[in-house]
Image: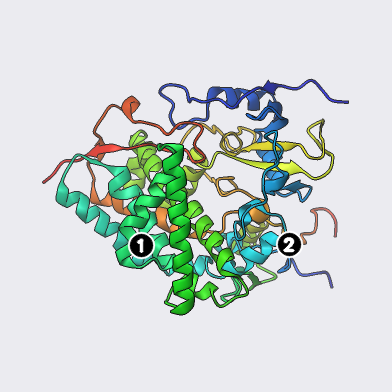
Amino acid sequence: MSAPLLSADRGRCIGAGMCAMTAPEVFDQDPDDGLVLLLAPEPTGADRAAARMAAGLCPSGAITLHEPEPGLS
Amino acid sequence: MSESVHTVTALPTERRSGCPFDPPAELLDARRQGPISRYTHPGGKPGWLVTGYDMVRSVLADPRFSSRKDLMNVVDFELPPAPPGEFLLMDDPEHSRYRKPLVGKFTVRRMRMLTERIEQITADCLDAMEKSGPPTDLVTAFAKPIPTIVICEILGVPYEDRASFQEQIDSFMGGEVSDEELIAAYTATQEYLARLVAAKRANPTDDVLSELTDSDLTDEELKGISLILLAAGFDTTANMLSLGAFALLRHPEQLAALRADPALTDGAVEELLRYLSVAKTFHRTALEDVELGGQTIEAGTTVVLSYNTANRDPERFTEPHTLDIRRQAAGHLAFSHGIHQCLGQQLARVEMRVAFRALIDRFPTLRLAVPADEVGLRPEAADIFGVKSLPVTWDTK
């Protein structure tokens, strides 16, 4: 099996909250330390689009999107 | 080899007359010439000025560029390291030692829980405005008190100290006082914060500063942290509220759309952040030789990053000089990018969403009380852009 669509690196996370704000169904912040919590590693539909945007907005590069390139499978 | 490159000898000191919301013309021109220009720091040291969106963003994410105050190469004497706790001017691991204990206290969820309280604070300000009647200065009646009261409550400044505390921070943030007054106000604020930290350690109350005493941070460090939370959390939001109100009043069709549809509020706040970019420039210093846009930034050279031109880059934002509250403004650099991205951004968003909404709902006939070109702007040299005052009026029933 391939890797899940999303992964989040709590070591890189700086807790800015961009992901929890942009894709609240996919990401949250740990109430104790404020760092990223991945709620849904395989989002679909609108949540997937929001997750893609969150990955692009993350200030510390803590979110990785493993999306297969179109045409390769 | 270096390609020929545009040169900017000094940062412009004025905006074009009639264009208070646009970055100075010389800066926009520099960006048109290319994302990076040669630049001379005011102290005479050679440097670089980055004005293009992609390049500003990539420098901010690049660990080869340092935020350290003591490495800044802009004057011909050595700058001291940042005081304990002032982590904005530090690199990791020092920066993250200070930021980490704060992060959980400024999450999206925790800041949204403050919504009701911020609505109450805003309503109190608007009640007072309504009671005293038009005209009024929106800076003193609305834009300053809201973020001041909020940050005081977060830090746990006792109610009876707020008036004198606000006066102190006003004088060292406004940029309109003499050096002596500035130093006196700064010293008084430092002393007050030192007493506050000691008081919270002795008798913890329900606020962020008290919570932070339960960590390995020293009193001196907590004082430094409190100072940057204040500096970052008060002047920025206050200027966004007043300049944002000014911008909305100058774009009546946008204001009408926002008034008619509360669902536009969150997007309007992001667009105002992009369009106004009140925190205009930050510095980074190269730790090693770095290639940027065909130029070599030599190790030890300090780069000025222009956030307001980056947020007006047509390669990133279509029609960048148009205020359009319906656009997708996400990705703007108003809160910076990289490991130093604004810690309090989720608080600022809640404050702006609540305050703009309440202001326009409460005063449907709100308008400037003076011609727009008579609204006094802060000097371009101020760290945070804004208006000095914003006289407004409205129809009373």
Could you tell whether B137 is left or right of B257 in the image?
A: left
Residue extending furthest toward the right = B1
Name the chain under label 2: B
Q: Distance between the residues labelled 1 and 2?
A: 34 Å
Residue at 56% in and 36% down: B308
Q: In this view, does B101 lie above or below B363?
A: below
Residue at 41% in and 53% down: B352
Name the chain under label 1: B
Q: In this view, does B280 lie above or below B2?
A: below
Which residue is disc 2 drawn over? B93
User: From this viewpoint, is residue B34 visible?
Assistant: yes
Residue type marked 2: Pro
Q: In which quarter of the image is the N terminus of chain B?
A: top right
Which residue is disc 1 drawn over? B118
Residue at 54% in and 72% down: B212
**Percent of width and height locating residue B65:** 75, 46
Residue type marked 1: Ile
| 10 Å crowding of disc 2: few (<14), some (14-19), many (20+) | few
Could you tell whether B154 is left or right of B317 in the image?
A: left
